[in-house]
Image (cartoon, coloured by chain):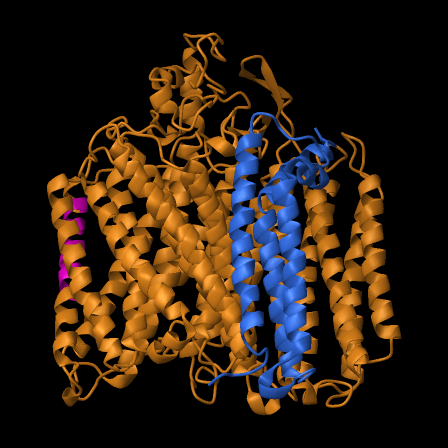
Chain colours: A orange, B blue
Amino acid sequence: MSTQPDNLPLPNKGPRPEHELEDLKRVWATPKGFRIVTAVNNTVVGTLYIGIAFLFFVLAGILALVMRTQLAVGDNAFVGQDLYNQLFTVHGTTMMFLFAVPAVEALGVMLLPQMLAARDLPFPRLSAFAIWAYIIGGLVFFSTIFYDLAPKGGWFMYPPLTLTEYSPGDNADFWLLGIGFIEISAIAGAIEIVVGVLRTRPPGMTLARMPIFAWAMLIFAAMIIFAFPAVILATMLLEIERAFGWPFFTAELGGDAVLWQHLFWFFGHPEVYIIFLPAAGLVSMMIPTMAQTPLVGYRLIVVALIATGFFSFGLWVHHMFTTGIPALSLTFFSAASMAVAIPSGIQVFSWIATIAAGRERLRLTVPSLFILGFLFIFTLGGLTGVMVAIVPFDLQAHDSYFVVAHFHYVLVGGMVFPLFATFYYWAPLVSSRMLSERLGKWAFWLMFIGFNVAFFPMHITGLAGMPRRVWTYPSNMGWDVLNTISTVGAFTIAAGVLVFIIDLFRNFRFGNGPENPWNAGTLEFLPNDVYSTRSIPRVTSRDPLWDRPSLSREVEEGLHYLPGAPTGGRETIVTSAVEAEPQYVIQMPGPSWTHLAAAAFTAAFFLLLTIKQVTIALTCGVLAIAACLVWTWQLDKPSQGEVDIGGGIKLPTYMTGPLSHSWWAMVVLMLVAASLYVSYFFSYLYLWTVSPEVWAPAGSPAPPSLLYPLGSAAMFVGGSALILWAGRRLPEEGRSWSATPLLLVAAAILIVGAIGLEVLGHIGTGLDPKASSYGAMVYMAAFLTGQAAFATVILCLFAVARQVTGQLDRRRRVTFDNAALFFYYTSAQGLFGLVLIHGFPRLIG
Amino acid sequence: MRMRDTSSNRQMIGTLIFILIGPILWALQLTLIYGAQSSLCAFEVGIGANGGNVLAAGTVIGASVLCMALAVAAFVMPGASYRLITGASSPDDQWPFLTSVMRILAGLSLLAMLYAALGAVLLPACAQLR
């Protein structure tokens, strides 16, 4: 199949008017000088994102070298116990939260628009906000290691060790608030990726023709949406317990430290696949190019990605096999651990089959070497994964160096090696020069040999009984030689990374590199500039550059869709999620200081709270909201009428309702909020099963009279009714007066009143959140809905301001629709909470 | 422009759900069996000798059979499942891709559900076994 069947005319005729290209260059120009920090183009912020993620990889790697030096021989005193605890905590936290997830999200931001031939992802400022928030928050978090403020509880931060009694000071708070904040940044990126992959594909790129990396990123983002809220809730609960004494994790008051483990690992295990799946997607893109043949088993790989993503949510308890859970429960998770091996295996076999089916022998380039290294190392990690999925074996290997070896084989093999392959393979998209094959091969062999020398012996060290997380060990245990070998291996890896850095300095130069240097078949190797591709092709196959050799020239000459900038601003085509048929043209925002200010003040808010500077923190919080409001004020541009994108297709330039990208983004945000609340619901029921003796009505004050929840419910429902009514009273175009603002304000008052009444009722019964886990859980429900209500009120008042200024009417109504959607969601959550908090104690009482 | 073509939107989201029928049922099964079994064991409802619990084991097997039956139904009748979820007829050009992905995922999910359910047949529901 060809991209544009020969019997069909191209969408546009050439030669194109000269001003089209000039318009594109002007509209998409990257800001110069210091204003470059305001840039939102995916190539600029994506490169910055990946660069900072790599910086964190190097920094965390240096911490690993310090640890390996300490462990090289027994009874060593190179670093003290306290510093060692900080080192392994910051190493793990940085590698997982500041390197691995951001690196793959960065690749999504950088590569997806090119692979989808979109001008950019649909919310470029949101991406830029997420990136800056991550940079500021990440650098501050990492710097704590230099002044003895780093957390010491491991990257998993298990209570009770991390409760105030055992971890006094601010160290743990830096983890809880700093990482919690960075998780929010990851979620912002995930929303962007979900909507981008589903709605900004080129015409004709159906689900069956999507690049595997796009599939992988879609699943990656969906997993973030469902996994991260669990750990966000966990960090909220632990921080609230540390700051205010609400006993979620304190056993004598009805809490349970194992609740943290459930919430953390419900995030933590999918996290492994959140890191691995995009890397697998990258491998699935590179192998066909290196073998010069289409991917064998495309459908099976799509299945494998989806199945792995799903099954990974059923594995969290396999990190908790030793916590005393009944054996049958363990089998459910052991079974899921076995099941997930099948889709992982499918991918490996598909890659091997593609290599075997190649039109020519696999080109042994640097990307190929890193991919082969990945296959070897990841497969070994997978085999030991099956071993630790077997409960009796895990009981023996748990908390030993065997586990350290296993997860490094999985994570370094499954993510770091594909990432280095990626650096070499896709460098030409952002660098005018290719990276060196000679230096790349040195880097690979040093890293590959170093990795196996460092980590293979750890299997034996672990089986010989060496526990994890120890700062030293007695010399007479027989572990010295193995540890010394591991340390030599660690420094060999570092030498490989150093060679790569030298290669970067010698050869990486910003700019567009040679066109399609690997002879790849996918769209990211079309001629690119700041505006992405000159025109957006209609796609009719999975490897369009192979199937239509003239495509690059046609696209560059502007003969496909949207060859100019017809609205005079930044724009791209929005297509349907399944068939990828053009639906409308989205008008996108350009460079701005607003998202940068929002990121800086949001980071300041969280980090200042860590050191208990509450007043300044709150001021920064207000400034962050103000910056967000200014940012969003510039969005929702009015319709520019219909524009002709070519091929006789005229598209609207404004869309609201269920087909609009903003509606999809809001729905995804609601899924995030719902996931967080489901995690809360689980926590409530879990603590009840652990400590029913503190639950009302027997162990705590009985819930207040039913009049309170009924009153709250009436206000939730009444507010929603007012919102519904307000939508029908939006003014006609060109008018700014209607009853809508009054109705919005009234609805906002009602939703605040609903939560206020709920809290008042419990205060009236004498229920104290510090007295028991039950009290803490009851007030937490109101707190969570209160958070959502706070955002709802801001959205409502923002919509009021838009209407008063004549920027909201029956046609231009995205602002209102978003506020309404979130209002309905918050009311539904509030009602569910009322049923739980007031119904459950009565049910069990 | 405000498009009111919600059927199109339903088809877009419904198609994604159609693909995911198997894994969704697997997630439902895991939630039901883990939730029911751990609650019954925690409150010592129906516990018999040696940590056995007929009620818990029965719940696990019942929930598993239900979810697996639904997955089999989707596997056997993809067209009807698609219409039920999306309210639209199947798209011709993408149908082979959509059905094959749905069916393979349903097959993998059936295997995963079977793995999980087997535990209830082989082990006492509430025992620590160590």
Q: Quadrant of the N terminus of chain A?
A: top left
Going by the image, does A811 lie left or right of A487?
right
> Which span of residues is magenta-colored?
A490-504
Q: Residue at x 68, y 43 (%)?
A: A815
- Nearer to me, A198 or A43: A198
Q: Residue at x 68, y 82 (%)?
A: A774
Q: Is residue B125 visible in this depiction of the protein?
A: yes
Please check the rendered image and state whether residue A36 is part of the magenta-colored stretch, yes or no.
no
- Nearer to me, A264 or A560: A264
**Main SS category, magenta section:** helix
Going by the image, does A688 lie left or right of A610?
right
Residue A527 sits above or below residue A46 on the image: above
Residue A508 sits above or below residue A618 on the image: above
Please check the rendered image and state whether residue A496 is part of the magenta-colored stretch, yes or no.
yes
Residue A389 sits above or below residue A211 on the image: below
Q: Is residue A677 visible in this depiction of the protein?
A: no
Residue A688 percent coordinates (x, y): 66, 81
Q: Residue at x 82, y 47 (%)?
A: A724
Q: Quadrant of residue A747?
A: bottom right
Residue A375 percent coordinates (x, y): 27, 50
Going by the image, does A832 lie left or right of B26?
right
Residue A112 percent coordinates (x, y): 42, 38
Q: Quadrant of residue A697?
A: bottom right
Q: Quadrant of residue A786?
A: bottom right
- Nearer to me, A763 or A251: A251
